[in-house]
Image (cartoon, rainbow, N blue to C red):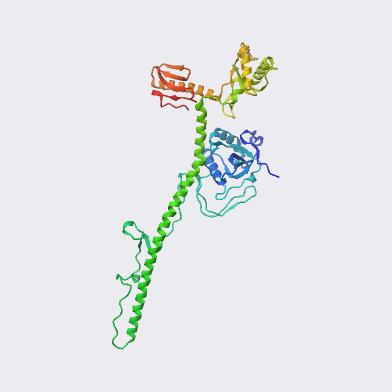
Amino acid sequence: MKKSLVKQNFLKKKPSTSASSGSTPADATQVFAFSGFPAQSDPRAICELINERLRTHLGDFALEVIGTVDFDHFAHVGVRYKVVETDALEAKIFELKDHWTFQGEYLNTVTVENPELFIYPALHPPAVLAPPEPVHHAHIAPQISGVAVSFVTPASPTVAEFLGETPAPQFPVVPPVPGFVPVVDKHQAGANVVLNKVAADMAVDDDESDNVSEASEVTDEVTNKDIMREIKTMAKQRKHDNKKTRESARVMIAEAVDPLWGEIRSQQSNLVDLGKASIVHDDRIGRLESQFAKLDVAKTGKFNPNDVAHLRMSFSGFKGDDLDDRVATLKAFMEKHFADREAYACIDTRTTGAWNDQKVTGESFVQFFCRGARDRALKAVRDGKLGENLRSNKGDKLTVNRYRTDWQRGRDWAMRKSEELIKAKVETAKLKVKIEYVQTKDERKITANGQIAFLQKRADAHGSFLNDFSELKLP
């Protein structure tokens, strides 16, 4: 039977009661995974990528990448963490959610039920996040849930080495062929070598002849001295031939080996460039494509049909944080006017702030099942003036309108924030400047003594500072 991998969403699971009560050992660990990688992704590449991201963004936590596994048509990268750090880790991951992407797509974080399914890819054993040190000898990976994986292969360059942030390991230094060294002046050398000096007793004759001069002619009786002279002549000839053969062999070897070393170094450079290009293609280009896709949506200035705001009817003006009163008020309103006309999905309140520190606003809403139902209900409210003198159960005066989209809220925020920054600059300079808000059909702007300080066109997501305020930037 196939084991289940995912237990639940890591960022949505309920806090552990045992961890909060202090009964969990300080060294107790659990595993979550980054999910959403393509199923056939290179395990080593995505492990290196997650290692890099964890070192950069979550270096304060004790985290350990334990390997990868393909499950439900996606690849997952498992990360071991300490149980006592769960809450802080969840908050940090949520805060940096825009950094967990791969090839332009957002990654999900899930809690792992069976960490033994993860296998760390060859070439790098799993290790606690620390600056990597290239090694070139055999490794034995630590056991993961009782399974040991052996590696007997040289380590490959890390992501940082690929991108040039740390020097990549060079080819091993090969000692020169005995008897010659590289030539500095290549124009003066027939081969790219010069011969080292040899011992005095091994020196070669300076003459160009291949033969050694013979001993003097024997005219008298052949004596032992004559025989010895002939033997010495033959020995000298043999030594001369050996030296010349050795020199010729050295030059031939140099002529053959030197171009090979040049080609090897060229191939090394090409491999490093290809590795860098692969990282850029898989990660940086993907992130840029994702950003440009967002810009393309923003430039249209049209509504996003997938924005949930198009399903909501807004009721603003509530005071306090009594959510039960809000639900009761809106429920009574809907039953009174739309009991037999339009069904709705839910009643809720808009909140702001971090996921674990939500604060209610003065706006609540009724969410319908489709945009058409919302539009019909809103038209009925306006035509029948159903929202006039509408009050909550506590007496708060309410206003009924469309629920604003994220696009609209972002544009309104940009106008408010830009006005704050412009006024702050004017006050710092202690100048008397008249700041005005001007709106036309196609643009909104803030002027300073009649000069445009901030301009937001109809299709702009935020807008831009101009003229004397061009150095200001929205946060």
- Residue 305 in view, yes or no: yes
Decide which of 24, 469 is in the foreground and name it. 469
Instruction: Write the residue at 62% across / 36% down.
Output: 10
Q: Is residue 184 above or below residue 11?
A: below
Number of numbered discs visible in the structure rendering:
0
Instruction: Write the residue at 63% across / 21% down.
Output: 372
The percent coordinates of residue 289 (x first, y second) are 51, 35
Q: Quadrant of residue 424?
A: top left
The percent coordinates of residue 43 (x first, y second) are 57, 46
Q: Spot the residue most to the bottom.
A: 221
Q: Quadrant of residue 261?
A: bottom left
Decide which of 16, 348 is in the foreground and name it. 348
Instruction: Write the residue at 36% across / 60% down.
Output: 191
Task: Please identify the quadrant where the N terminus is shown.
Answer: top right
The percent coordinates of residue 151 (x first, y second) are 57, 53
Decide which of 219, 107 is in the foreground and name it. 219
The percent coordinates of residue 463 (x first, y second) are 46, 24
- Residue 349 in view, yes or no: no
Q: Is residue 336 above or below residue 232?
A: above
Q: Quadrant of residue 20?
A: top right
Horizontal relation, residue 238 to residue 302: left or right? left
Q: Is residue 98 above or below residue 190?
A: above
